Amino acid sequence: MPLSHRQLDAFRMFMETGSVTAAAERLRVSQPAVSKSLVGLEYDLGLTLFVRSKKRLVPTHDAQLLHREVQRLFSSLNDIESFARDLRFLKSGELHIASAASLGHTLVADSLASFAAEHHKARIVFNVSTTVSQIVINQQVDLGFSLIQVQHPALVNDPLFHAQGVCVVPKSHRLAGRETITAEDLQDEQFISFMRDSRMRHIIDAAFEQRRIARYQQYDVFTSVEACALVSRGLGVSIVEPLGVAYAQWPDLWVARFEPAIRFTFNVMRARDRMPSRLAEAYLGHLTRAIERIRKHAEAESRLIELSLPA
């Protein structure tokens, strides 16, 4: 016959209190009910757990050993209850994210900080990658963030926000001070580009190639932050998505609107066959609020950073 929770609870309480009366009071049951549970436990286990001495039950050595195991069992049950409670209130669990560097080093990292403060027991796995879509397709993460909207039957894509590209030049540059810089203004300039396989590189190059405007391209970088760092040191000019500008102080950098307008769309993707966890949904709430904060801050300061939410 399988052991019952009632038997083990009565045994644990008796071992902790040392008497049937005290155990019954703790459990809020009758003394006969506790005695019956103890007798039943001995019978079901085929062990002598107690000897009777002067109308008292005295635990045997086997009972002491069994008590250790029962304590471990109840400790594990308490841990499970605590874990389930944390899951219910979104304090625990796991969140796996993959992101393109332009988002990962700025907006995603920022929103993860506020998310972690609220969900301090949650385990977070954060991967900055150039193959976000494949990681999502393989169901290795809950959410992926990218500039690319990959069309694949296993993926669900949603635009997070749109951003206008900006032109950055050193403050000592001849174009510094202009509110708008055009592609023609950058003819024959030393231009800091993104990596050749980058989506941003393809978008920006197309704007110049359509107008047959030549640039010198000596430097290739991975993110907008690196592009801004090189521009601020006088190594060239660049077109960047605005997050790299918004998330850092660049005292030696001039930021201007760029024409023709280049619009970047930042997307969130998930596997079609993977239900989003409540923790992932909670994180998206933090991310959306972070996007809104940047947009309002840029508007308040009249900065040349334009973010718009999808219609």
Image (cartoon, rainbow, N blue to C red):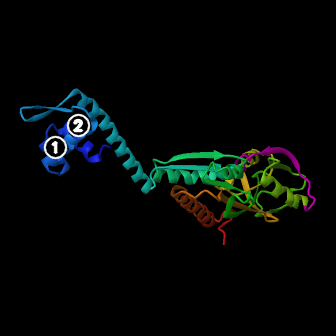
Q: Is residue 71 magenta?
A: no
Tell me if 284 is positioned left or right of 229 in this view: left
Closer to the chain start, of discs 1 and 2, is 1
From the image, tell me which residue sits under label 2. 42
| Rendered location of residue 198, percent (x, y) | 78, 50
Query: CA separation, marks 1 and 2?
Result: 11 Å
Figure label count: 2
- Residues rendered magenta in the picture: 210-226
Residue 69 vertical placement versus 149 (above, below): above
- Residue in the picture at 54% in, 47% down: 124
**Depth check, front residue: 8 or 193:** 8
Say whether residue 249 is visible. no
- Residue in the picture at 28% in, 33% down: 66
Q: Which element carries disc 1, helix, strand or loop?
A: helix
Categorize mark 2 by other alpha carbons within 10 Å: few (<14), some (14-19), many (20+): some
Q: Quadrant of the C terminus?
A: bottom right
**Mark 1 touching mark 2, by CB under 8 A?**
no
**Amino acid type of disc 2?**
Glu
- Residue in the picture at 75% in, 48% down: 227
From the image, tell me which residue sits under label 1. 35
Residue 276 vertical placement versus 194 (above, below): below
Residue furthest to the bottom: 311
**Depth check, front residue: 267 or 10:** 10
Tell me if 187 is positioned left or right of 193 in this view: right
Residue 48 vertical placement versus 93 (above, below): above
Q: Quadrant of the N terminus?
A: top left
Residue furthest to the right: 212
Q: Is residue 224 magenta?
A: yes
